[in-house]
Image (cartoon, grey):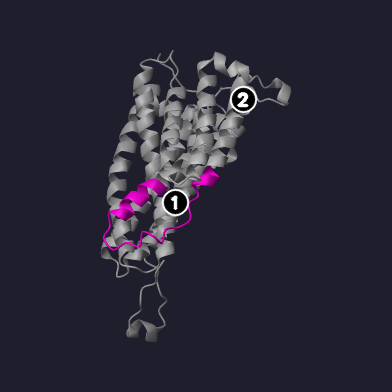
Amino acid sequence: MTLTRPTPEAADAGEPIRRPGVGRAVTVLVLVGLAALIPLLGPAAALHGTGEAEAPGTGGIALLRAVVFLALCVPVGEWFVGRLTRSLPGAPTADAPRSWSPYTAVAGFVAALGLASVVSTGNLVPHSLDQIDVGGLYASRDGKLALLEVNAFLLAAACARSRRPASQLWPLGAVIVAEALRAHPAPEHTPLVGSGLTLVHLTCAALWAGGLLHVLRTLRRWGPVEAGPALLGLYARVAAVLLAVITASGTWSSLRRMPPHSILDQLTTTAYGRTLLAKVLLVGAVALLALCARIRLRRATDPLSACSPARMEVVALGLVVVVSGLLTALPLPIRWS
């Protein structure tokens, strides 16, 4: 974060140098800390006092799903920012940061393999290799989707090492589709609508979080060049649209699972509602940080000072990914009565 230059009179008077926006930054950090409290303490904290039973291995499953989401964000963000960079005149496109996609694809493969092993035992945590029934995965819808994700990440890892790394988007798209279908089983009311909302929500979230991470890596690699603020500004304009779509799809999905007449009660009395509330607070903090970054980008003497709140935004988005992983492992609070 940049410092404001004191006037000669202030320097003579011994007044301290003030950092701009410190109060807002502290407020955001407090919000992030409070919102992250439930997921960081684990499923037991979210389930405490709700009367809901904790499924076996909820914490581990939440962690594996968070890794899967992260493995989607990084390569999608790299591709997205690469497209933005090529659209900027004079941008040093050849001087790009090293891709993390091969490593995240391997991490996604391991996480998907772990989730598939849980599905193969009837959603129980296996304690030995003998308990894993690989052939049984083909007998259920969830098993086939789990196998699809394992194979898709394996193919994405191979594509990331190939001459055309952008081809990994196809298997990663298959993972997003599989996650959307898995989250909305056939017995659910209008499952295709729910799957469509999850598909849009997850795709936009991957573009937003992964894109910001790669923008900051790119700016650090480039150094103080004229194309830096232009890239950050271009990303900010697209990110505003992504945030609007994420908010709309997330709100619609929540209302499908928690009807309007009971949503306020379920936000505090169910584990799913509590974790969803934590996610909403985190996203709100992220939006505030994004707004601070955009104001600095437009008004500050050094536009790249906007990178300071943007880095905090990346940290908050990382917490959002963790909360999202926990959200998928908790029981759904469907109470229509």
Does residue 79 show up magenta in the picture?
A: yes
Residue wearing tag 1? 314
- Classify 193 as above or below 217: above
- Classify 224 as above or below 211: below
> Which numbered tag is attached to residue 118?
2
Give the crowd class for mark 2: few <14, some 14-19, many >=20 residues within 10 Å: many
Q: Residue 177's quadrant in the figure?
A: top left
Q: Residue at x 38, y 24 (%)?
A: 195
For discs 1 and 2, the disc positioned in front in the rendered view: 2
Can residue 247 be seen here?
yes
Q: Amino acid at mark 2?
A: Val
Q: Amino acid at mark 1?
A: Val
First reached walking from the N terminus: tag 1 or tag 2: 2
**Bounds of the magenta span?**
78-104
Give the crowd class for mark 1: few <14, some 14-19, many >=20 residues within 10 Å: many
Q: Secondary structure at mark 2?
A: helix
